[in-house]
Image (cartoon, rainbow, N blue to C red):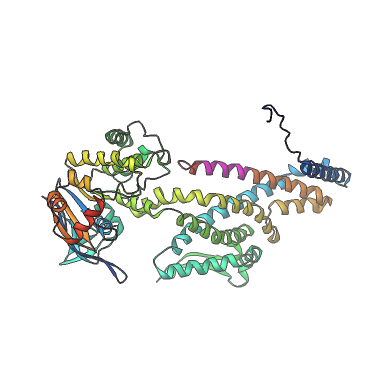
Amino acid sequence: MTLVRAHGVRKSYGSTEVLRGVDLTVDEGQVVCLLGPSGAGKSTFLRCVNHLETIDAGRIWVAGHPVGFVLKGGKLHELPEREVATQRRDIGMVFQRFNLFPHRTALENVTEGPIQVLGRPRKEAEREALELLTRVGLGDRGGAYPRELSGGQQQRVAIARALAMKPKVMLFDEPTSALDPELVGEVLDVMVALARDGMTMIVVTHEVGFAREVADHVAFMVDGAIVESGTAREVLDNPQHQRTRQFLAKVL
Amino acid sequence: MASEDLQVVPIRHWGRWVVGALILGLLAALGFALADAQILYEDVPGFFTHEIMINGLVNTVVLAVCAQAGAIVLGVLLALLRRSPNPVARWFAWGYIWLFRGLPVLLQILLWFNLALVFKFISIPVPFTDAFLLHEPTNVLITAFVAALLGLGLNESAYMAEIVRAGLNSVDPGQIEAAKAIGMTPGKTFRRVVLPQAMRVIIPPTGNNFINMLKGTSMASVIGFLELIHAANRISSGNLEIMETLIAAALWYLIVVSVANVGQYYLERAYGKGVR
């Protein structure tokens, strides 16, 4: 079943066109990695998927809904933020710079969504949050504030925070780019485990090794468009496009 | 070769001794002068706990707290208007701040107090009917307390708007994105994520302003509001012990300000969670 379908997505900042017609389909349980040089529009596209950015043209459907819009009388009407918020419950997101809430402990970061957004009872939310923290290897750090945690630990809490909403799809926006090299592994391990558990994931990354290991599908983006896509083996081992070859030659 | 247990002689800071001695000397001179002054110190405790003085104290605190509370609420609203994508809202907030910050508080208090000279009645009509939600003589509505509350509160709200705006601007936009990403509505995002973090920046200058507000209530004495200064004047008008009553009022100001300092300390600690 198709979970995310993007068709002809366009986006400009002023006169600069950052997305020039992006098409992407993600099936349930699939892991899709978006690779490409900086400024290719990978992050912008990912942020369009949960309507943190508004698209100028095209459409993005997640779990059967056009994100940020409602289809009425053959037109897409933009939704007010309150209703976009409801749609976003199904879409988890992990940021490059973690963005944990600094005034709340790791456990409170994870329970914030379930309690405040889903209205779950505190006890229940805390029990599940603890399970999630244990799953990312931080079961004993629930009482720590973000500043007391390393970058890798913070990113793992951020993953737990997103998972607590029981999303249908997880978006990862360069989740390891802000980490010290020796901390990258612990975050990737959590993501690999998540992929193995069948989570649907769209991952913007420079970690070609991760893409090779878990991606069902790899898309290579340049200048606001996907120039090449296919299985990890096709794109990474036998790139057809000139730019893909150049990029892989540099990062490998 | 040097021996290993050479004695170390710390440098002598003679200047510090001289400055210390000078300050102590001056303080002693001031003490002698005050002891010799023609002040009836034994009367001060009586004025300090005088019924009128206590009334003045209560009125001072009530006025300051009400004006500051109103100013905080208005300030948050104005800060939101100034950050609004709506140009009319931004323009209005800018003009409001320009006006109420630009005029002296004393002038504003006097303007409000004398409102009855230009408007005999204050009315809120119900649209399309002859009925009124409110229709009262201005003299009845604008008491000295109300005039002082408006003068102090509206002026302070202009300052609070800028303080709150600075606080809101200090919050990392990534925090708002993270809140959105877990499905928070804009209202929840503001209350649960943005405001608690902005508070760290908002509280210290607000505490500062509240202390100014406590002292600023003294301007309401001009329109006959019974706050501490007016209380002191009223007591001394009978016995002419002007300095003694003012000293009693001064002691109350210092006490109230000290209590406010303690309150600010605890507020800062509460909102500093996870940061310090």
Residue A156 falls left or right of residue B120: left
Q: Is residue B140 visible?
A: yes
Counting from the top left corner in percent of width and height, residue A193 is at 21, 38
Quadrant assignment, res A225: bottom left
**Quarter residue B115 falls in:** bottom right
How many numbered callouts? 0
Report the span colored magenta.
B259-269
Where, by quadrant of the figure, is residue A181 drawn?
top left
Q: Return the residue nearer the eye: B81 or A164.
A: A164
In the rendered structure, the answer to whether residue A4 lies left or right of residue A185 reads left
Residue at 83%, 50% in the rendered image = B241
- Residue B225 position within the rendered picture, expressed as x and y whole percent measured from the top left: 67, 56
Q: Is residue B263 left or right of residue A86?
A: right
| SS assignment for the magenta stretch, majority | helix
Nearer-the-camera pick, A113 or A24: A24
Within the magenta stretch, is there residue A191?
Answer: no
Q: Where is residue B16? Give x, y as percent.
A: 76, 42
**Residue B87 in the image, given as x and y percentages of width and height:** 41, 70
Say if A14 sits above or below B52 in the image: below
Q: Is residue A35 visible?
A: no
Residue lying farthest to the left in this orientation: A1
**Who's the residue at 54% across and 62% down the image?**
B158
Answer above or below: position of B150 versus A140.
below
Please name the residue shown 43% across and 43% down the image.
Answer: A103
Q: Is residue B265 magenta?
A: yes
